[in-house]
Image: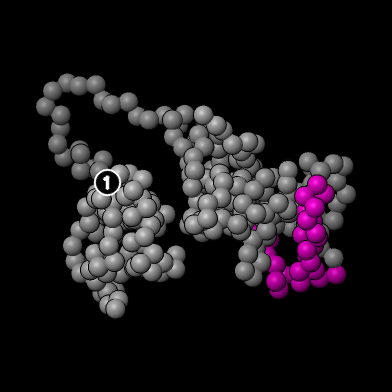
């Protein structure tokens, strides 16, 4: 039986992550064993008893367990260790307490060209990436693309969304798995006739239980989500603004045209 952890404790925060993903103790154990098999090391295994104890008692997981939790809960390891009072943001300040005893070359910082960002590439049975969502609220995403492909995107000024792997509304203009940049200041649908499809604004729309990305029209108190003609999707109609809210206009996209092999 699962115990009730102390509110605000590291264990409570870990349990909150697990419950948010609707994972049972058994689910986490099964996934960790799959990871351990992939890594060929039993150190990654998280047993039900171990996880129940750490959620309700005060002790610190090993680096392998932290990696496993990061992988299964789809959250940065820095977030996991912060639950236990270790804040990586303090590293630079703490390093400044101890000067280097001899003259040295500092290690080269990793450049943008070598950095990657996690994005959905293809579906797996145990992932639920079928729905379009805001990237800030997305949990289960995976895969990598070079950061230089999206380095023009500015997270300080824009919101980002990810197009669900089964969302073909704007295909092939915007393919499933794409990351889109959204300008929240552009939320008004203007009754303008556009000369071509590339000039027509694409909007990111929040519905009651999902998000969609499409062209929009406002008619008689309803929002019409208009798909790309080649997608073979149907126009969807929602009472506006009661059942549909425009998050903003799509102003940029990072899109994989084909999956690489090799």
Query: Bounds of the magenta span?
Result: 220-247
For residue 51: magenta? no
Quadrant for the N terminus in the image: bottom left
Q: Is residue 253 above or below residue 57?
A: above
x and y, in percent, of residue 233 in the image: 78, 56
Q: State the image quarter where residue 6 is shown.
A: bottom left
Instruction: Decide if residue 209 is on the left or right side of residue 137.
Output: right
Q: Residue at x 85, y 41 (%)?
A: 196
Residue denoted by label 1: 41
x and y, in percent, of residue 50 in the image: 24, 64
Q: Which residue is drawn at 36% across and 50% down?
A: 35
Q: Can residue 49 be seen from the camera position used here?
A: yes
Near-viewer residue (84 or 165):
165
Near-viewer residue (235 or 88):
235
Q: Residue at x 56, y 33 (%)?
A: 260
x and y, in percent, of residue 13 in the image: 33, 66
Q: Residue at x 77, y 59 (%)?
A: 225
Near-viewer residue (76 or 230):
230
Instruction: Decide if residue 12 is on the left or right side of residue 258.
Output: left
For residue 237: magenta? yes
Q: Is residue 75 above or below residue 25?
A: above
């Amino acid at each position: 039986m699962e115990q009730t952890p102390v509110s605000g404790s590291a264990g409570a925060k870990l349990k909150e992550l697990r419950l948010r993903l609707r994972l049972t103790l058994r689910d986490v154990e099964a996934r960790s064993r799959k990871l351990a098999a992939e890594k060929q090391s039993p150190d990654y295994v998280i047993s039900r008893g171990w996880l129940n104890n750490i959620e309700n008692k005060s002790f610190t997981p090993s680096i392998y367990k932290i990696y496993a939790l990061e992988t299964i809960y789809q959250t940065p390891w820095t977030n996991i260790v912060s639950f236990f009072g270790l804040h990586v943001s303090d590293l630079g300040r703490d390093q400044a307490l101890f000067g280097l005893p001899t003259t040295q070359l500092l290690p080269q910082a990793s450049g943008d060209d070598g950095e990657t960002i996690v994005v959905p590439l293809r579906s797996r049975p145990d992932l639920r990436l079928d729905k379009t969502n805001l990237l800030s609220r997305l949990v289960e995403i995976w895969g990598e693309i070079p950061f230089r492909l999206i380095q023009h995107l500015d997270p300080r000024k824009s919101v980002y969304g990810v197009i669900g792997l089964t969302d073909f509304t704007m295909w092939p203009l915007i393919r499933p798995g794409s990351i889109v940049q959204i300008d929240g200041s552009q939320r008004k649908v203007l009754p303008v006739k556009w000369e071509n499809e590339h000039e027509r604004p694409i909007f990111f729309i929040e519905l009651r239980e999902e998000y969609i990305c499409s062209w929009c029209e406002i008619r008689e108190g309803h929002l019409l989500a208009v798909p790309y003609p080649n997608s073979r999707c149907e126009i969807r109609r929602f009472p506006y603004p009661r059942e549909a809210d425009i998050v903003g206009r799509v102003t940029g996209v990072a899109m994989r045209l084909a999956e690489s092999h090799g």
